[in-house]
Structures are given as C-alpha cells and as structure tokens.
C-alpha cells in the first residue's frame, strides 16, 4: 500500500500559512475519508480539517503549534493502491512541475503574473530566508513556478546565503525573517483580537508582607531561596482554587470547559525581545516548596527557549517589576481566560487608615475574557489575590 502526504488545504483567498492547533487522530488510527483529523488556525478562524483519504495514519510531520505553509505536508497516510495524492486545493493529485532537462524559463515580471507563479510554500520558504516580496519577484525560476530550489540557487549565486540590502523609495533596507517563536505568538495574539472581549481591572496590593517574608527567607541563608514573585504566584494559585472561572476556557460558543486544576502560565522574556511561556501544570496541587521548585524548573526551561504553552493554560502572569512599570493593560491570549500583570513596588499612602503614612505597594492589573465572566466575578478574584498576598505569612511557613 502506498504512503501519501496529507497537505494543508487552500482555504480562503490569499492565505499563505496556518498554525497546527491540535491533532485529532494518532499514528496507527484507521481514518475514513472526510473524518476530521486535525485543527488548523488561519488569520480568519480555527477549523477542523477532514482527511482527503481513507487509510491508516502513519505519522505527523510537525508538532502542534507549528506554523506551516499552505500546501505543505502535515502528515503521512497509508492508503489503498491506486489512490492519488491530493494537492493543497483538496481536489485531485498534487501538482508536479514538468520541466525539460536544462530548460530555463524566465517568469513574467508583472506583479499579477508573478504572484500567480509563486506557490504559498515558496513564499513561506522565502520568509524563512529573509526575502521580501520585492526581492522575491526578481528571482528567476527554472520552471513555470518559482520553487524553493530557485531561492537556494539565487542565494548561492549571491555568495552569502543571505539577502543583500536593496533600494526602494524609502531608502536602503533589508528584509529579515520573523523568528518562529514571534510568528507563533503573533498568531495567538491575532486570534485573541478576533475572539476575546477584554475587560481590565486594577488594584493596589500591600507589598510589605511579601518583602518581610522574602527578607526572612534570605536571612536563613539556605539553598531554598524563592523570589518575591514566586511568593506572589503562589498566592495567585491559592486564590484560583475558589474561582473555577479562571480554570475555564470556551471550547465553542456553547461549551465551557472547566479544568479540575490550574495550569499556570508565566511569561518569560528572552534576548532579542522574544517571549515564551513557562507553565506549572496542576499548580494548585503543590505545596509551597513543591510549587516554588517546579516554577523555577519551568522558568529555567523557558529561558533555554522552551515554550511550554498548551491549550490547558487558562491564566498567565507577567512580571514587569524590574522594568519600572507601575501599570499596564495586559493582553489575553486564548484559550486563556485572563492575564495578570504585576507592576513595580512603590511608596504609596497607606489604605484603610485615617493616618497619613507611607507603605510599600504594587499594582496588579487583570485583563479577563468578558465572554466567560463579568466584572463582579473578576473584581472578587482580584481582591482574593490581594487578600492572599497581604496575609502571605499564613500561606507560607519558613
């Protein structure tokens, strides 16, 4: 039985790439034609994609969260004899360029014809190599379509393997490929603007209890030295236990999925302004020492470039204390229901007292998905966090 490729179909005009969101079948599964086998996300929607064949799934060619070019192979299937491979359009065999040996065909230079002669997977490959549309239109092809091999030949001819700076009306410039991690984040953010109805609320939290606890831990001079932020994160986890909405996500317009435990995301910045997510799964099942240890392990992995985001992360934390930022409006990235911002520590007037006194405060800002919960529920959750932070000595014993 032959093995054929399952290709990303062309859905919608002008789409060049899609993100693999989830796989619905596993290698070894027998699949009927038109059975949903994976989910893909474009800049327009998330959709189930049906199998163009009947047969057995052999393997997935890319992990979940990979951005793939339209027309690119995502899986392999074992099918019956005589079945032809389906191309990106989803109907009929995949196109194969037929070129006589030694033939060199110059593609037309008009923008319309050039666009028609550049397949989506070639455009995606060009992006990886840092080639913009203007430079791409000038590359000669060895067939009636510009292929990745033509780009390799062009770069080899330049002698550097990179695109040289070129001139335009805006002056000299150089096109650079957007890093894969940033493309993935951008895909999630764009999806968020399409789905989430955001609301943001803020509250000032008395930070002195955490500073006192941190000083007490530090004075012990032991090897276990969790940061003030880790203590804050632990307080958030304890608050989530009583607010199941922050362990929830919308599967679709009619289904709200609530997880038994919280997978807590922690935003980690990398050199070059890259951003990845560390995740502490089932964080609410861990005691203080276990949580602090696991959080450190996951953050270290993230700093090595390991993005741990998955569909079960419903709440994320972003810590900007070291950047001198007191307030911000965080962004919710679905399927998360909320993002919590922690600002710098500052001197503020003491609250809940008639005396004029200064205390150490930090502002926290929560952006939440209004489709899942409303302002009162979000306010109660933020105030629960405030209470946990201000009574941190009762949560953590050292």
Image: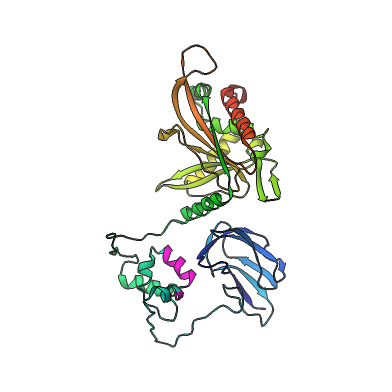
- Depth check, front residue: 237 or 366: 366
Asked if the magenta segment contains residue 122, the reply would be yes
- Give the residue at the far bottom of this rendering: 100
Q: Position of residue 218 (x, y in %)?
A: 48, 25
- Give the residue at the far top of this rendering: 355
| Residue 225 is at least partly visible in this image | no
| Residue 91 is at least partly visible in this image | yes
Q: Which residue is drawn at 54% across and 43% down?
A: 298
Q: Which residue is drawn at 38% across and 84% down?
A: 104
Q: Position of residue 171 (x, y in %)?
A: 27, 60
The quarter of the rendered structure image containing the N terminus is bottom right
- Depth check, front residue: 338 or 74: 338
The quarter of the rendered structure image containing the C terminus is top right
Q: Where is residue 290 in the image (x, y as percent from the top left)?
A: 61, 35
Give residue 88's quadrant in the image. Answer: bottom right
Q: Position of residue 190 (x, y in %)?
A: 52, 52
- Depth check, front residue: 51 or 26: 51
Task: Give left or right: position of 58 versus 154.
Answer: right
What secondary structure predominates along the stretch shown in magenta?
helix
Give the magenta-colored segment's residue range. Answer: 116-127
Q: Which residue is drawn at 47% across and 47% down?
A: 275
Asked if the magenta segment contains residue 179, the reply would be no
Compared with residue 101, is residue 89 higher up or lower down, i.e. above or below?
A: above
Q: Which color scheme does this rendered protein use?
A: rainbow
């Amino acid at each position: 039985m032959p093995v054929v490729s399952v290709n990303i179909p062309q859905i919608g005009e002008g789409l060049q790439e899609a993100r693999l969101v989830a796989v619905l079948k596993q290698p070894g599964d027998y699949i009927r034609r038109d059975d949903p086998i994976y989910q893909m996300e474009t800049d327009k929607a998330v959709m189930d994609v049906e199998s163009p064949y009947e047969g057995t799934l052999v393997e997935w060619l890319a992990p979940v969260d990979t951005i793939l070019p339209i027309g690119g192979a995502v899986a392999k299937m074992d099918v019956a004899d005589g079945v032809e491979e389906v191309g990106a359009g989803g109907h009929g065999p995949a196109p194969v360029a037929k070129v006589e040996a030694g033939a060199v065909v110059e593609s037309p230079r008009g923008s319309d014809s050039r666009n028609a002669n550049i397949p989506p997977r070639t455009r995606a490959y060009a992006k990886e190599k840092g080639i913009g549309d203007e430079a791409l239109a000038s590359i000669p092809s060895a067939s009636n379509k510009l292929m990745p091999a033509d780009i390799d030949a062009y770069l080899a001819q330049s002698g550097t393997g990179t695109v040289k700076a070129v001139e335009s009306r805006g002056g000299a410039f150089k096109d650079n490929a957007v890093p894969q991690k940033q493309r993935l984040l951008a895909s999630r953010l764009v999806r968020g603007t399409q789905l989430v109805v955001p609301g943001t609320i803020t509250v000032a939290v008395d930070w002195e209890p955490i500073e006192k606890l941190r000083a007490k831990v530090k004075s012990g001079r032991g090897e276990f030295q969790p940061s003030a932020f880790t203590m804050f994160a632990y307080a958030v986890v304890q608050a989530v236990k009583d607010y199941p909405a922050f362990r929830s996500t919308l599967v679709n317009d009619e289904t709200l999925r609530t997880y038994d435990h919280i997978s807590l995301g922690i935003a980690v910045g990398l050199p070059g302004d890259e951003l990845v997510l560390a995740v502490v799964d089932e964080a609410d099942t861990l005691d203080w020492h276990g949580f602090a240890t696991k959080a450190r392990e996951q953050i270290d992995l993230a700093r090595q470039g390991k993005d741990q985001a998955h569909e079960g992360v419903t709440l994320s934390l972003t810590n900007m204390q070291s950047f001198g930022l007191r307030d911000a409006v965080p962004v919710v990235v679905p399927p998360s229901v909320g993002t919590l911002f922690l600002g710098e520590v500052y001197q503020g007037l003491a609250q809940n007292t008639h005396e004029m006194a200064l205390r150490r405060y930090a502002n926290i800002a929560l952006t939440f998905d209004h489709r899942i919960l409303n302002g009162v529920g979000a306010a109660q959750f933020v105030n629960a966090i405030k209470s946990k932070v201000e009574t941190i000595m009762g949560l953590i014993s050292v």
